[in-house]
Amino acid sequence: MARISGVTIPSEKQVWVALTYVYGIGPKTSLTIIEKAKVEKTTRVKDLTDAEISRIQDIINADLLVEGELQRIVSGNIKRLKDINSYRGLRHKANLPSRGQRTKTNARTRRGKKVTVGGTAKKVASKT
């Protein structure tokens, strides 16, 4: 089990896939890191040497913001938008999509479980 930037990455996966488990590293960035570290991308994490792991860690520390530091910056940016009451900040406060998506039909992930409005069922006519 290799630890990179405080994250235990899965040992059975290829290196380029396993690096994407670190917050702030996607597939493209992962491939760039591996190319700089001169590691074969199809190598499994369990087969990496300590020297290769340390080279990967050094490149990440030198070039990228990852994990806690990146999350602090992102949450700080959102807090700033909320504080200045920008439109995007108001959308974040209301827990609604902030990038222009429609909300009439979709946006269930952001808005939560559907709440049915009562009184829509037709009443059955009864004999009097």
Image (cartoon, helix red, strand yellow):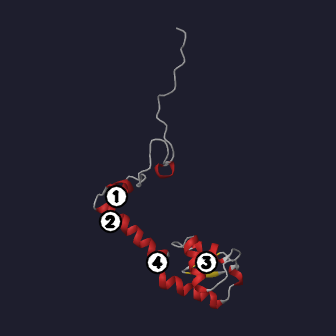
Q: Where 127 falls versus 18 (above or below)?
A: above
Q: CA distance from mark 4 to mark 2?
A: 20 Å
For mark 1, give the secondary structure: helix
Q: CA distance from mark 1 to mark 3?
A: 34 Å
State the image coordinates of residue 68 (x, y, percent, origin top left): 47, 75
Q: CA distance from mark 2 to mark 3?
A: 32 Å
* Mark 4 vs mark 1: in front: 4
Q: CA distance from mark 4 to mark 1?
A: 24 Å
* Mark 1 vs mark 3: in front: 1
For mark 2, give the secondary structure: helix
Going from N to C along the chain, the mark reached first, 2 or 1, is 2
Which residue has dot 3 on it?
Answer: 8
Pointer 4: residues within 10 angstroms few (<14), some, or many (20+)?
some
Question: Of all residues shown, which one is farthest toward the left?
Answer: 84
Which residue has dot 4 on it?
Answer: 65
User: Can you tell which mark lies on residue 80?
Assistant: 2
